[in-house]
Structure formats: C-alpha cells, structure tokens
C-alpha cells in the first residue's frame, strides 16, 4: 500500500449547523480538483451526523469522496461517561477517522500518552483510523528537547500496537507553538521531526510499514505556505485548524499536496 496524502480539517468548537453544512457542501463541490488527496472533515461531535448527511455517507461509501472524522472519543465502548462519545458511535455516524491526543486535549483536558494509547487501541478495534497528534511546546523546543519529547509521545501513544495496526495509523506532527499562532514551522524544522517519527515507526514496526505511514504536519498551515511543506519528503499531508473553516483555503492547502 502506497503512502496516502491526507488533508484533514479540524473545525474544533467552531461554526453553527448551517455553516457546517455550507462548508461541507463547499468542500464536496470542489473535491474533484484534488483527486490525489484524501480529504477529511472533523466537525464538532454534535454536528458529525449533520456533516455525514450533507456528505450523503452510506455505509462505507462516500459519494463525494470526502470523509468524516471525530475530534476525540472515549476509549470505552459504552457506560457512565457523561458527555463522552464512544468509538462505535463515530463509526455508526459514518466516521472513518478520529483525531486523538490533539495538543488542546493534552494541555486543556489532561490527556496523557497513556490515555492517547488506550484511545488509539480502541479506535483501531472499532475500525477507525486514529490521527495521533504529537508535538513539542516552544519551551521544549528552545530547551533543545524536541526530539526527546516527540520520541516519548510517539512511543507512549503507540505502545503495544502490532505492526499491522501501526500500518493503519496516521501521525500528525503539530508543534504546539505553531498551532493557531500564525507561526508555521519552517519546512526544514518540520521535515527533521517527520523523519524522526518515520525512523521511530521503523523501529516499532518495520521500515516497510514506516515508509507507508502518512505523517501530517499541523500548525498554521495556509494555502500560501503549504507547497513548501508538501515538497518535503516525509510530509504527507496536513491537519488544518483555522484554515479548514473556509472551503477555498482548505482546498488550496489540499492542492499543494495533490501531486
Ligand atoms: C490544529 O489545531 O490542529 C491546527 C493545526 O490549528 P491551526 O491550523 O489553526 O494552527
């Protein structure tokens, strides 16, 4: 299986229902412009069903070729977990992907590598593709700890996964200092960490598995900086926050990876 380019939009806690539908339809209408890229929309969980309906998802098919993802989930299949969403609820609503361990989940909601690991296993067991987020803070980068921090996050978040499961995972390298700040990592800074992540995957699984895993970059990706990131050998797509809220910007980023 060749490495797949994937551009995913993390809408976070933004938009209302009408805007979510309009954005979905705007992306789906121009999906054919980027045939070489898998497009994924990750709405707030309350709108996952609405977006799935707008995409006309049916079973395992998406007529528009745009896929749906959750922004988070619980690792348990059901139970007394007020406010949470189970993995099978996401698949039931047509999700193919789920973002796990986003830095906002890690810093604002206390998610540790162990929690992300449990969620990654539960996602895979439910048939979801986990988009596992890792990335260092500015303080950690300035202290020269980027490699140590990212290594610990990758190893901790993916601990115990079989090579077969590792082959299904997507990793998003998102330096925390670049998320929502307008400060994008340079292509060289990003490539260095992506290459590290791929070498860690080679150790955890095999070089062949590592070669096929999609590693996205995230952090202030915009249409005008996406091409230089896409030109790097180990950057296989983007996890996009702010710019995913406008169809033209989201598709402009996807166009940079459409080669
Ligand atoms: C994100 O939250 O995953 C993200 C990358 O946000 P932004 O593109 O807004 O920096």
Image (cartoon, helix red, strand yellow):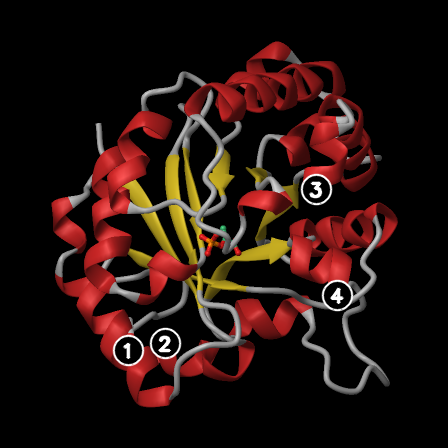
User: What's the CA distance linking mark 3 and mark 1?
Assistant: 37 Å
Q: Are marks 3 and 1 in contact (CB under 8 Å)?
A: no
Q: Element under label 4?
A: helix
Q: Is residue 88 visible?
A: yes
Q: Nearer the viewer, mark 2 or mark 3?
A: 3
Residue underneath mark 2: 51
Q: Earlier in the sequence, mark 4 or mark 1?
A: 1
Q: Which class describes the residues within 10 Å of circle 1: few (<14), some (14-19), or many (20+)?
A: some
Residue underneath mark 4: 108
Q: Element under label 2?
A: helix
Residue at point 25% right, 40% down? 224
In the image, residue 101 lies at what x, y percent? Answer: 69, 53
Q: Which class describes the residues within 10 Å of circle 3: few (<14), some (14-19), or many (20+)?
A: some
In the image, residue 108 lies at what x, y percent? Answer: 75, 65
Q: Earlier in the sequence, mark 3 or mark 1?
A: 1
Q: Are marks 1 and 2 in contact (CB under 8 Å)?
A: yes
Nearer to the camera, 49 or 11? 11
User: What's the CA distance linking mark 2 and mark 3?
Assistant: 32 Å
User: What's the CA distance linking mark 3 and mark 4?
Assistant: 14 Å
Nearer to the camera, 41 or 177? 177
Residue underneath mark 3: 137
Q: Earlier in the sequence, mark 3 or mark 4?
A: 4
Q: Earlier in the sequence, mark 2 or mark 3?
A: 2
Would residue 148 be found to the left or right of residue 220 on screen? right
Say which quadrant the N terminus sits in: top left
Say which quadrant the C terminus sits in: top left
Q: Earlier in the sequence, mark 2 or mark 4?
A: 2
Q: Is residue 150 visible?
A: no
Residue at point 35% right, 60% down? 244
Nearer to the camera, 223 or 39? 223
Outermost residue toward the top in this view: 207
């Amino acid at each position: 299986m060749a490495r797949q380019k994937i551009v995913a939009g993390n809408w976070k806690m933004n938009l209302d229902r009408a805007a979510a539908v309009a954005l979905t339809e705007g992306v789906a209408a121009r999906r054919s412009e980027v045939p070489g890229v898998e497009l994924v929309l990750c709405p707030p969980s309350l709108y996952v069903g609405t977006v799935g309906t707008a995409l006309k998802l049916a079973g395992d098919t998406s007529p528009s070729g745009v896929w749906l993802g959750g922004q988070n989930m619980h690792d348990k299949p059901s139970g007394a977990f007020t406010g949470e969403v189970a993995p099978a609820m996401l698949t039931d609503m047509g999700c193919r992907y789920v973002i796990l361990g986003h830095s906002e989940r890690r810093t604002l909601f206390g998610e540790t590598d162990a929690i992300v690991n449990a969620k990654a296993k539960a996602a895979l067991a439910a048939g979801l593709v986990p988009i596992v987020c890792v990335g260092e803070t500015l303080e950690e980068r300035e202290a020269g700890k980027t490699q140590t921090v990212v290594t610990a996050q990758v190893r901790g978040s993916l601990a115990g996964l079989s090579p077969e499961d590792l082959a299904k995972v997507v990793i998003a390298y998102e330096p925390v200092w670049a998320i929502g700040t307008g400060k994008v990592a340079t292509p060289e800074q990003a490539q260095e960490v992506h290459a590290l992540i791929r070498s860690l995957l080679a150790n955890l699984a095999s070089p062949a598995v590592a070669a096929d895993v999609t590693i996205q970059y995230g952090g202030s990706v915009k249409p005008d900086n996406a091409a230089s990131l896409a030109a790097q050998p180990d950057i296989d797509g983007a996890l996009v926050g702010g710019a995913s809220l406008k169809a033209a910007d989201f598709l402009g980023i996807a166009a940079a990876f459409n080669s």
